Amino acid sequence: MNRDVIVACDFPGKKETLDFLDRFKDEKPFVKIGMELFYAEGPDIVREIKKRGHKIFLDLKLHDIPNTVKKAMKSLSDLDVDICNLHAGGGMEMMKAAVEGLTREDGTRPLLIAVTMLTSISQEMMEDELMISGSLPEVVMSYAKNAKDAGLDGVVCSPLEAAKVHEVCGDSFLTVTPGIRFADDSKGDQQRVTTPAKAKEIGSDYIVVGRSITGAADPVAAYRRCVEEFCR
Ligand code: C5P
């Protein structure tokens, strides 16, 4: 397993993103590109960051009928990203179709991970609005198992769920975990947060860190602190 820190580049446009990445002279952080940046700049921003030598997690959370997702994944596969994702709630047929679409002629493909239940969904919302019964952790584990059975490589989950996901789906099933803060940071809008060191202890494979790095006075030092706590 290659434990790594993924920096969430939640910027509105190309200029802010490239200015930020230019600050890194000695390392090439693994970069997460989300909907905000992708919808603003299109696939060219992925090509540009890839060309600079960064690994990329393209966080677009696909959720549609299997045929549409399969074809969308084919387009993403041609973009040569390292990780992409979808919603496990789209069902197993959709997830299997996504794996097919993503797989290139030579058999290689980016890693594919599933969002289980968004961390913004509470137990109450799940029952009253989505009409899904059961406890939220049970639903998360069931979706993780579906993702594994559909041939996916892992899930996005809370670092606090990482150990349980590994217990249910095996150690090689990846856990990619946002919700990371340094011990001396404020939580912001994240509710269930842990430090990079704690995420390592629980067994996350990748941590996704946004504002603790992008909003730091010295982002390079903050990134190095994350790597030190999580990877070493
Ligand atoms: O700034 P912060 O470290 O909270 O950023 C976390 C990143 O992870 C953001 O890009 C956010 O969209 C993403 N994310 C999350 N919770 C999820 C899935 C993704 O915070 N369940």
Image (cartoon, rainbow, N blue to C red):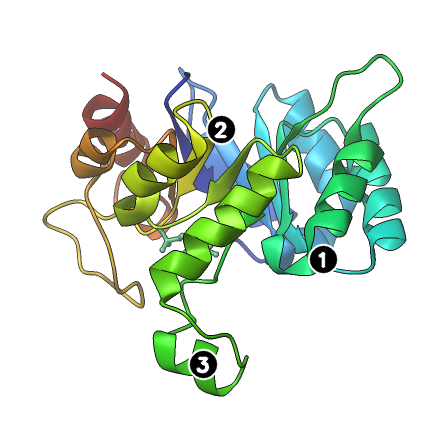
State the SS at label 3.
helix
Please indicate, yes or no, whether residue 216 appears anywhere in the rendered image: no
The amino acid sitting under disc 2 is Phe
Q: Is residue 73 visible?
A: yes
Category of crowding for the residue at label 3, using alpha-carbon neighbours closer than 10 angstroms: few (below 14), some (14–19), many (at least 20) = some
Q: Residue at x 63, y 56 (%)?
A: 35
Judge left or right: residue 161 versus residue 58.
left
User: Label 1 to label 3, Cα distance in Å?
Assistant: 32 Å
Residue matched to label 2? 30
Quarter for ligand 1? bottom left
Q: In whole angstroms, how far apart are the C-alphas of marks 2 and 1? A: 20 Å
Q: The C terminus appears in which quarter of the rendering? A: top left
Q: Is residue 186 above or below residue 229?
A: below
Residue labelled with disc 1: 39
Point out residue 101 in the picture as x, y percentages from the top left corner: 84, 36
Which residue is at 53% across, 40% downward?
32
